[in-house]
Amino acid sequence: MEVTRVYHFSAAHQLQQPALSADANAALYGPCAGLHGHNYYVEVTVSGTPDPVTGMAVDLGAIDSGVQRALLAEVDHRRLEAVPALAGVVTTGEGLARAFWKVVAPVVAPAALARVTVVETAKNRFEYRGEDQ
Amino acid sequence: MSDVAYSTRRFTFAAGHRYWVERWPEAENRRVFGSLTVPHGHNYTLDVTVRGPIDETTGMVIDLSELKRIVNDAVVDRFDHADLNADPLFRDRVPTTENIAVVVWGLLAPKLGVDRLWQVRVWEDPTLFVDYGGA
């Protein structure tokens, strides 16, 4: 089974590909090229099997404190481009989901991370499952 | 050959519970479960997903009114405004969100068939949900 915890943070960001000129970034990313922000939701999903005695598949308290310390404290009320763990990341929803996976996977251990979902707005949702092609 | 789709209907029920292992002393229960040992309750949300071929006559995977009747009879009527710890299904099973998902699956699988029942998602509150698809 999969257990999902939903977390929240607010942050500023802008989509900028450093290899491109300002005009090219504006053309590529449109309004997202300028500094703006979102009320983000991050869904952290781990897989496991309920313990036959406690009925718990994962230690939610440990996951909460790990995600708070390693991720939320780093990004909440920050400019995402200035966050050390996001150095070099174009902060699209996809880019954030992939970068957050790297941050979250070690702190939810021994639980196995199944996916990280970044909800940028009520209309935009991005999932990363640690897959490549 | 028919095209397959997934239909999900949402249900809600309010229930009370506490985390408690009968054969443990009180101190051990408190150490492991903390404040969850105190009886409390939640507004649970249940998303039931059925997978199947789209019937080319009706255009449906399942008649959602049939799904509604089955889930209400088997799950919602049983657990809404109930003490989960008092239900025989939780006699030897702590009513965690994980175990509620397993129990709901067990109640629905015989009614809907494992070939149709795809997933149950149990939300304890807007910050926590468990997905279970059997086995």
Image (cartoon, helix red, strand yellow):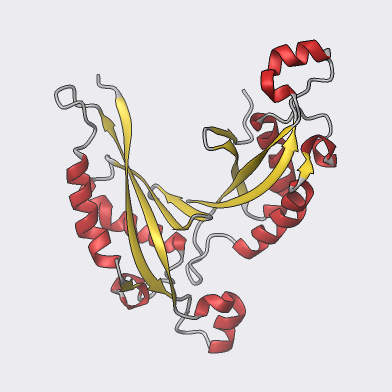
Q: Nearer the viewer, residue B66 or B102?
A: B66
Q: Nearer the viewer, residue B32 or B66?
A: B66
Residue at 29% from the left image edge and 66% from the top image edge = B80
- The quadrant of the rendering that contains the C terminus of chain A is top right
Q: Is A65 situated above or below A16?
A: below
Q: Position of residue A129 (x, y in %)?
A: 60, 36
Q: Is B14 situated above or below B59?
A: below
Q: Position of residue B127 (x, y in %)?
A: 53, 55
Residue at 63% from the left image edge and 64% from the top image edge = A61
Report whether B124 appears left or right of A34: left
Q: Nearer the viewer, residue B79 or A47?
A: B79
Q: Position of residue A59 (x, y in %)?
A: 61, 63
Farthest residue toward the left? Answer: B57
Report whether A39 appears left or right of B119: right
Report whether B52 appears left or right of B46: left
Query: Residue A115 appears in which quarter of the rendering?
Result: top right
Q: Nearer the viewer, residue A83 or A102?
A: A83
Report whether A57 appears left or right of B133: right
Q: How many marks?
A: 0
Q: Position of residue B108 (x, y in %)?
A: 26, 53
Residue at 31% from the left image edge and 70% from the top image edge = B89
Query: Residue A64 appears in which quarter of the rendering?
Result: bottom right
Residue A23 in sight: yes
Residue A59 in sight: no
Residue at 36% from the left image edge and 53% from the top image edge = B46
